[in-house]
Amino acid sequence: MWWEKPGHLRAVGNRLFIGEHDVVELAEKHGTPVYIYNLSRIRDNYLRMADALKKAGFREWRIHYAMKANNNKEVLGLIRELGGGIDATSPGEVKLAREIGFKDEDIIFTGTSLSNGDLEFLAKTNVLINFDSVSSLRRFNGEEGRKVGLRINTGVGIGRVEKTTTGGLEVGSIPVKFGISGKAIDRAFDLIEEKGLELHCLHHHVGSDWVGEKIARYFQALDNLLKVAEKAEARFGGSLKVIDLGGGYGVPHSAEEEEFPVYEFFQRVKEHMEEYGFGDLKVIVEPGTYLVSDAGILVAQVNTVEEKNGRIFVGVDAGLNVFNSPALYNYYHEIVVCNRVSSEEKMVATVVGNICESGDIFAVDRELPKIEEGDYIAILNAGAYGYVMANNYNLRPKGKEVVVGGPVRFPD
């Protein structure tokens, strides 16, 4: 099966295993709904990206994990153990990263619509801030000489869907709120000069979970960012030391999609940077989905199998309050019947949750092994933007988190 990966997900007879664990046994032990994360897979994903960055020949580089994707403490502890840094988007994320043992120097902050309280908190830290707007930069009262970054909207957006696209002026009918663009870049440069700050980093983020043919468009965005770097170099001399490439590197959601080509991608990034004369700058990447999405599954138990109006509905004990990716983004997520993985007896079913909303649907008319009440299903690619976005809507539980493939060492 396309989703099987050595040491991670596999079918053993008719059962689904994650790492060395029978998923049904984990579900029966911990109850459902339950997110299960395999630290071994996260480690493999991290080391693969690190190897690609190393082989691309960057003079200096670092992976800063986008903790908004999954802020489980053991996941964060693993990133720290591997030598990674953190991409934070709120004071709360900065505080949690510190709790795990990350130093301020390990944290890059790129938030949006920052309040005065947010800015006051950040001014008292030593984290590198990528300012998302002229307004936040104007209201920031940092010490003279402090190193700062700017999030640039390069005019190019790439995402799996419109709602996960964060670059460009608008995507369809959705205006894009992120980043500084056009004449506002000059105003940001002016403010940096007026406040006695030091422009240390230029950052961009085009969108989330892009794969396949969309990858080629990234380099238009990168070229536009490097043109801003040329302006910064002319204005500030050699203060610019870091190009922050953002994240968004995707993962396959179906058999038709290929793995993200990290080796070829970063080699091409290096070539573009050299063309613009910035080949020696430090490179930061901020993966979230790439590191944790395929490392996590959401397991739910089937409570209802019933035909209604010519369709077979399979109801489970998780809803959009637990995992909202299909409802919010219309993402396709593979569904595996944990105790009937290899069954040749099939059915076409619509898989729905237990929330009183018409949009509480995980899959429509999906071919699956024949399901019975009491079975367990696993929704794949649930390790990113799952539990972190869960809530208690309808006063339903958010579910639990279980981690396998450890252990992780925490600082004393």
Image (spheres, helix red, strand yellow):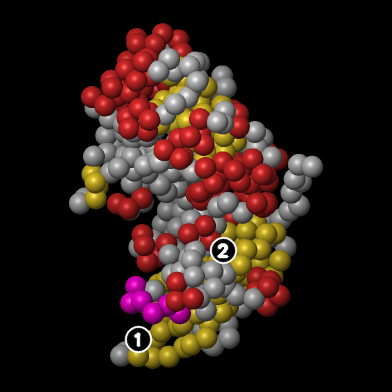
Q: Residue at x 40, y 47 (%)?
A: 208
Which label number is shown at residue 311? 1
The image shows residue 245 at horizontal and vertical percentages of: 44, 32
- SS for tag 2? strand
Q: Is residue 17 left or right of residue 310?
A: right
Q: The residue under label 1 is which amino acid type?
A: Arg
Residue at point 48% right, 66% down?
391
Instruction: Between residue 182 and residue 395, name the one nearer to us.
Output: 395
Magenta region, mostly helix, strand or loop? loop
Q: Say which mark, if any, is on residue 273.
A: none
Q: Quadrant of the C terminus?
A: top right
Q: Can residue 248 be seen here?
A: yes
Could you tell me the amino acid type at mark 2? Ile
Establish if 53 lies above or below 344.
above
Q: Quadrant of residue 243?
A: top left
Where's residue 61, x and y in %?
Answer: 56, 26
Can residue 243 be seen by looking at this rendering?
Answer: no
Q: Earlier in the sequence, mark 1 or mark 2?
A: 2
Give the magenta part as a residue range. Answer: 352-359
In this rendering, position of residue 222 left or right of residue 238: left
Q: Which residue is mark 2?
A: 297
Mark 1 → mark 2, Cα distance in angstroms: 26 Å
Instruction: Please give the name of the residue rendered at 67% of the width and 52% of the height, measured from the top-left corner.
Output: 74
